[in-house]
Amino acid sequence: MTVSLMPTYARMPVSFERGQGPWLWSTEGQRYLDAISGIAVCNLGHAHPKIAEALCDQARTLIHTSNLYGIALQEQLAEKLSALSGLDNAFFSNSGAEANEAALKLARKYGHSHGISHPKVIVMENSFHGRTLFTLSATGNSKVQQGFEPLVDSFIRVPFGDGDAIEALQDPDIVAIFLEPIQGEGGIRIASDEYLKRLRALCDQRRWLLMFDEVQCGMGRSGRWFGFQHADIKPDVMTLAKALGNGFPIGACLARGAAAEVLTPGKHGSTFGGNPLACRAALSVIDILSDEHLVQRAAALGETIRSAFQEAFKNNPKVKEVRGKGLLIGIELDAPCMELPLKALDAHILINVTAERTIRLLPPLILNDDETRHLIDTVIGVVDAHTGH
Ligand SMILES: *Cc1c(COP(=O)(O)O)cnc(C)c1O
């Protein structure tokens, strides 16, 4: 690996040059099953012919103009996302952190418009919201923050899942609650439906915004289009990115009701955000997810994979828990296992570990039955070998 790159990543000793569906081929000509999808990005697998065609066609037609002008594809995409989510409108960015930056700015401005000059946002322990200064300040992981102080200090942190801790807060400067309905980096932690409903009711009572970071769990991966839909409530603000463009960079901040009217001309923007090429990619992603019923497929595959793991590991004392929703799957071990992804390379599968001891699987939603069986068998083999079972 070249020393011309800033050493920001501890990279695995493999590089890929080609992909097809859930498979990747390394520069050494070896084939790997991708059970992480570029971290929940390539939900439709690699080199999807319809996305490739949409991107090529759009590149030959129009890549970029500017948000100084109308962009029909951006309006179409906003309409589709609004219809799917029940929110009212959308702002487009190029990444998850930027989508969250928009949401956090929106919350502050909402506060100012209610006479609150130092607005505060409630955030969760073990959350992840990105690497910009505002979003890393919101993130509940001191490793992400260390060395970048002073942080933006307008956050109140509470334990994930603890409704009482929030209800007890009496600070009049609070304007919003911001959380992932399913924590990804935090170890595949699922907020219960009752908890999310309680947060909705609290926000209604106190005129706070309920804001969901669905950058990782959104776009069908959880077995519903959006993670919050499992709880049958609606947020005021939701952010998306990762799978929205299947690898083409695009993020979105959607809003509803009063929150949809907060960011007015001159208050936020992005040069690239929502350009025709990015929106064409995302429109194509939504069409494929709908036409091929892949959201339902994610729910069914998740059930199959989790129950196979539960059965295989039921007598393994070193496996603490198998959990997840749809194709966000966590296998928590009883000890740190950060070296497992490297070992799994020998078994030709790409997996990942979060929160030190939780194996995270985020396979593409297009897995066929044979590929699903292969994933199950390979992961069981890797875990059995690691735990000596
Ligand atoms: C990945 C992620 C982000 C950050 O997205 P980037 O595109 O890397 O900026 C934010 N929130 C969640 C929940 C994520 O998983």
Image (cartoon, helix red, strand yellow):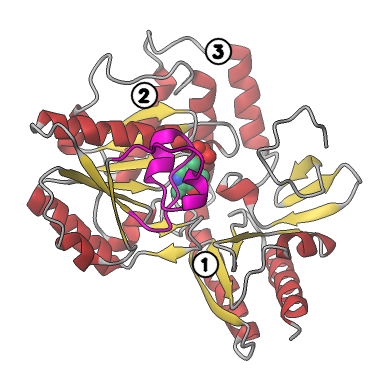
> Does any portion of residue 287 appear in the rendered image?
no
Location of residue 79 in the rendering, given as x and y in whole percent from the top left corner: 33, 32
Residue highlighted by disc 2: 75
Label annotation for residue 300:
1
Amino acid at circle 1: Ala
Location of residue 352 in the rendering, given as x and y in whole percent from the top left corner: 65, 58
Write down the region rendered in magenta. Answer: 124-153
How many badges with numbers are in the image?
Answer: 3
Disc nearer the start of the sequence (3/1): 3
Location of residue 54 in the rendering, given as x and y in whole percent from the top left corner: 60, 28
Question: Where 150 falls versus 277 (above or below)?
Answer: below
Dominant secondary structure, magenta? loop
| Category of crowding for the residue at label 1, using alpha-carbon neighbours closer than 10 angstroms: few (below 14), some (14–19), many (at least 20) | some
Q: Secondary structure at mark 2?
A: helix
Residue highlighted by disc 3: 62
Residue 148 painted magenta: yes
* Left or right of residue 276: residue 202: left
Q: Secondary structure at mark 1?
A: helix
Q: Secondary structure at mark 3?
A: loop
| Category of crowding for the residue at label 2, using alpha-carbon neighbours closer than 10 angstroms: few (below 14), some (14–19), many (at least 20) | some
For the point 16% across and 46% down, the residue is 208
* Left or right of residue 32: residue 226: left
Proximity of marks 2 and 1: CB atoms separated by less than 8 Å:
no
